[in-house]
């Protein structure tokens, strides 16, 4: 369930959410499914000025008793309480848009002796709208996920992505796009790094 508030004051809104997690919905056979649920809150403050706007975002989400599954998708008997914090900014000035966010994800096992985990990451990007009726949009973005911290140890799991995109709006519900991504994985998984180019059409209704 989610509730998006109206403005409490000029430019300030809240998003509130809570509900059952995937285990409780029956996605797994978790023995702790009855206590698998989540809640979260996000706050947004938008400022408008002549020719543009900027919005500050902060968010928090907590998931309780999420089952750890083995390769066969079965419950291992270990459960995690997962917490995510996010702070970000987005905005636009004329034809230029921008965004950035920083995320911290923490996981605490309910099993004694298992080290807590933490993972941080960020993403930034810019867009530029142009052409007749601003139907064209160019976008460049960069995202990085840092190595996973397990207690006093660090797992070599980080990855980094550079991406570019060119969109053309056919109408309000469809776009044609060309995309390119350069995905760089950690030293351990270096061989899984790859480049990808694609073109296509997206339609939504």
Image (spheres, grey):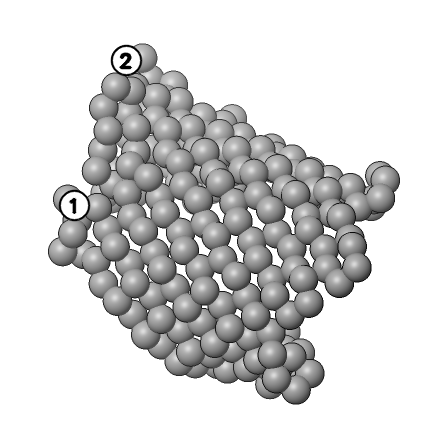
**Residue 54 in view in this figure:** yes
The residue positioned 65% from the left and 60% from the top of the image is 92
- The count of marks equals 2
Q: Quadrant of residue 158?
A: top left
The answer to whether 138 appears left or right of 135 in the picture is left
Q: Position of residue 205 (x, y in %)?
A: 63, 74
In the displayed structure, 99 sits above or below 153; it is below
Closer to us: mark 1 or mark 2? 1
Dot 1: what SS? loop
Q: What numbered label is drawn on residue 187? A: 1
- Furthest toward the right, the residue is 9
Frontmost residue, 61 versus 142: 142
The tag on residue 91 is: none
* 142 up-or-down from 65: above or below: below
- Asked if residue 127 lies left or right of residue 82, the reply is right
Asked if residue 65 can be seen in this view, the reply is no
Q: Is residue 55 above or below residue 155?
A: below
Q: Quadrant of residue 127?
A: bottom right
Could you say where residue 48 lies in the image, as x and y percent from the top left?
78, 53
Q: Secondary structure at mark 2?
A: loop
Is 131 left or right of 181, judged from the image as shown?
Answer: right
Left or right for 99, reference 55: left
How packed is label 1: few (under 14 Cα within 10 Å), some, or many (20 or more)?
few
Residue 140, given in percent of the width and then of the height, sits at: 45, 64
Q: Earlier in the sequence, mark 1 or mark 2?
A: 2
Residue 91: quarter of image = bottom right
Could you tell me which residue is drawn at 21 percent across and 58 percent down? 193
On residue 113, the disc is 2
Give the residue at the far front of this rendering: 50
């Amino acid at each position: 369930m989610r509730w998006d508030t109206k403005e409490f004051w000029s430019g300030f809104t809240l998003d509130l959410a809570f509900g059952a997690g995937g285990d409780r919905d029956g996605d797994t056979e978790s023995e702790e499914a009855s206590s698998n649920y989540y809640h979260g809150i996000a706050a947004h403050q938008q400022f408008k000025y002549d020719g543009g706007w900027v919005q500050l975002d902060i968010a928090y989400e907590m998931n309780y008793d999420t089952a750890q599954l083995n390769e066969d998708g079965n419950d291992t008997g270990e459960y995690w309480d997962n917490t995510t914090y996010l702070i970000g900014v987005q905005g636009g000035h004329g034809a230029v848009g921008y965004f950035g966010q920083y995320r911290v994800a923490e996981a605490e096992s309910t099993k004694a002796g298992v080290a807590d985990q933490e993972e941080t990451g960020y993403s930034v990007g810019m867009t530029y709208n142009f052409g007749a009726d601003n139907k064209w949009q160019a976008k460049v973005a960069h995202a990085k996920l840092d190595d996973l911290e397990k207690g006093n140890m660090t797992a070599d799991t980080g990855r980094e992505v550079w991406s570019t995109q060119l969109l053309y709006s056919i109408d309000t519900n469809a776009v044609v796009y060309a995309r390119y991504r350069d995905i760089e994985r950690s030293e351990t998984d270096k061989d899984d790094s790859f480049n990808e180019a694609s073109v296509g059409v997206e339609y939504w209704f």
